[in-house]
Amino acid sequence: MVRMGFTGSRTLRGAASAFAMALTLAGGALGGAALIATPAAAQEYTKNFIAVYQPVAEIVNAEGGDLNAARAQLDAVQAAIGSEDDRNAAGSLTLNIGTKLSDKALQRRGLEMMLQSGKVAPEQQAQFQFFVGNLAYDANDYAAARTALQAAYDAGYREQDVRPIIAESYFGEGQNQQGIAYIEQLVAEQRAAGEPVNENLIRRALRFAYEGNDAAKATELSALLITNNPTTESWKQGLQVVNAMVDLEPQAQLDLLRLMLATDTLSDRREFVTYIEAADVRVMSNEVQRVLAKGLQQGIFSASDDYYSEVKRLADQRAPIDQREAPALVTEARGSGQGNAAQSAGDVQLSLADYALAEEMYKLAVEKGVADRDRALTRMGIAQAMQGKAADAKATLEQVSGARAPVARMWMAYADTKA
C-alpha cells in the first residue's frame, strides 16, 4: 500500500495582512492630503484630479473618517486621472483605504495602479510585485499571481522564495503538468547553481504525477527525489510509488524488490512474500535466506510462523546445493555458444551475492545473445551497482528499454547515490 504522505508547499495565503509594510514602501508622502497641499507638488497633478482627490484624501487622513464613504468615491478619483502622477497618487490612496478597511481587493488595486504609473522607485518594485502576487494568489487569480511573483523574483525579491508559490499557482488552476514541469526546471536550476534543492517541491510534483496516474513521470520524479535526498524515507516513498504504478512481470518486480532490500525499504509482509515467491526457493535459495533473515529481524516473520518455517526449511536444504552447483554453471556458460546458459549462471551468482562473477555472466549473456536482453542488462547493472561501479552501472542501465525501464531508472538512482 502506498502512503502518499505529501504535504503541500507553504502558500502565501494570509501573508498579505501585514500591509503596514506596503504603506511604508509606498511612502508617507504618497498617502495623504499633504501630497497636493504643497504648491510645488501640486504642479505635478492635473487640476481636475486634485479637485476630486483632495476631499477623499482628507476623509482618509481624518481621525475617525468615514472610510466607507471614501471607498465609494474611489471610482470617481480613478476616472479623474489625467497623468501618471495622478495615477500613482490615486493608487496610494486606494491602498491606504484598502489597508484601513482590511479590503484585500482594494489593496491589490492600489498597488497595481502605483506600479502602472511607473512612479514606484526601482528599489521598491520587487516588493510591490510581491504584494500584488500575494493578493492575487489569495484571490485565486493564479495567472496574475504567477506574473507578479515572477516579476518580483526577476526584480531581485529574495525575502522569501516565491518560486514554490509560482508552482502552486499552476496546481491551483489544475494545470498539473505545467506545475510539474516548472518544478523540474526549478530543481535543475537549483542544482546547476549549487543551491539546496527544495525536496518538498519534488514531493509535491510527485503527488500530482501519482494522482494523475502518470507512471513515467512518477518514476522520473521518484528518482529525482532520491538522487537529491537519498534518505530511507525518500527511497521508501519513491519505490512504493513505482511498485504501485508500474505493471511489472514477476522477474522485473523481483529486481525492484531487490532494490528495496538494498535500501532497507521493504516494509510489509506482502512485499516480503512477493519477493520470496519471485526469487523461488528452488532457484535462488541463498537469496531467499537473506530475505527471510531480514523479515525476521524486522518482525515481519516470527520463528513460529508456518510460512516462514516452511520456506526456511526448503531454503536451508537447497542453499548448499546451489553453492556446490554454481561453479559448474559458470564453466558451462563460458563454453556455450549461446547466452542463455550465461544468463542462468548470472542469476545464480546474483542470488549468491557474488556480484563480480554475476556481472561477467551477464556480459557474456548480452554478447552471445539472449531472448530477454533487457533482463540481462538490468541485472548486469544491478551487479555493477552493488559493487559500487556507479558509472558502469548507469551506462548499462541506460540501455534498458520497454517495461523494465522504470526498474532500471530506479537502480540508476541507486548508482547515483553511491557515486
Image (tube, rainbow, N blue to C red):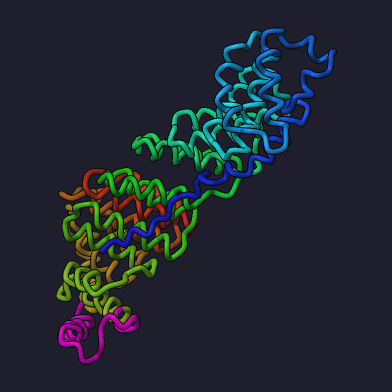
Camera-side residue of 243 and 212: 212
Foreground pick, 344 / 126: 126
Q: Position of residue 312 (x, y in %)?
A: 20, 84
Which secondary structure type mostly characterizes the magenta part of the structure? helix
**317 in magenta:** yes
| Vertical position of residue 410 compared to residue 155: above or below | below
Residue 46 in the figure: left or right of residue 285: right
Rendered location of residue 120, percent (x, y): 70, 23
Instruction: Reply above or below: 275 against 313.
Output: above
Region in magenta: 295-322
Question: Can residue 328 be seen in the rendering of this structure?
Answer: yes
Location of the N terminus by quadrant is: bottom left
Marks counted in the figure total: 0
Position of 338 with respect to 125 (left or right) is left
Q: Nearer the viewer, residue 249 or 22?
A: 22
In percent of the image, x 71 and y 8: which residue is there? 46
Which residue is found at the position 24% from the left and 50% from the top?
404
Left or right: 186 with respect to 204? right
Question: What x and y, as percent, mark residue 360?
Answer: 32, 59
What residue is shown at x 61% (from left), y 33% (from top)?
67
Q: Residue 34 lies in what quarter of the image?
A: top right
The verdict on residue 12 being magenta is no
From the top left corner, tell me how far across and down residue 143 is, in percent: 44, 29
